[in-house]
């Protein structure tokens, strides 16, 4: 597995994306449009190849106003 940095993007080569990875990508595609974020927790270990008994994904975002929260909520439930 090779990790390449291009600006603020990390590219991980030589690793097949799991269903969990694809889910995270879909969530971040939505979240990126509305707020900055940082991924914390065990998902980072999973992303870099470690196995874990849990597959939780913890994200930190700044406090947002109610209208932004409601838009995010609606965007997250749209795809089902």
Image (cartoon, rainbow, N blue to C red):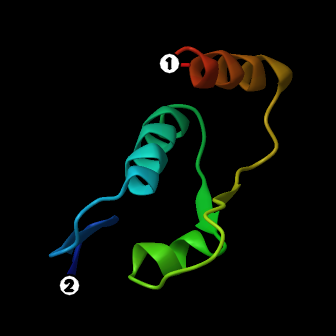
Is residue 21 visible to the viewer in this orientation of the structure? yes
Q: Horizontal and vertical percent for residue 61?
A: 71, 50
> How many neighbours does mark 2 have within 10 angstroms: few (below 14), some (14-19), or many (20 or more)?
few
Q: Nearer the viewer, residue 39 or 47?
A: 47
The image's mark for residue 31 is: none
> How many neighbours does mark 1 have within 10 angstroms: few (below 14), some (14-19), or many (20 or more)?
few
Q: Nearer the viewer, residue 30 or 46?
A: 46
Query: Which residue in the structure is indicated by mark 2?
Result: 1
Image quadrant of residue 75?
Answer: top right
Q: Is residue 55 left or right of residue 17?
A: right
> As displayed, is residue 1 above or below residue 73?
below
Is residue 6 visible to the viewer in this orientation of the structure? no
Query: Which residue in the structure is indicated by mark 1?
Result: 79
Gap between marks 2 and 1 measured at Cα: 31 Å
Q: Nearer the viewer, residue 66 or 17?
A: 17
Q: Nearer the viewer, residue 53 or 56?
A: 53
Assess whether mark 1 and mark 2 are in contact (beta carbons under 8 angstroms): no
Q: Horizontal and vertical percent for residue 1?
A: 20, 84
Image quadrant of residue 34?
Answer: top right
């Amino acid at each position: 597995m090779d990790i390449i940095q291009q600006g603020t993007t990390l590219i991980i080569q030589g690793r097949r994306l799991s269903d969990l990875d694809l889910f995270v990508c879909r969530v971040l595609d939505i979240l990126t449009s509305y707020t900055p974020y940082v991924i914390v927790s065990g998902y980072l270990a999973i992303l870099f190849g470690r196995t874990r008994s849990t597959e939780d994904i913890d994200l930190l975002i700044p406090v947002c106003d109610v209208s932004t929260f409601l838009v995010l909520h609606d965007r997250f439930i749209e795809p089902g």
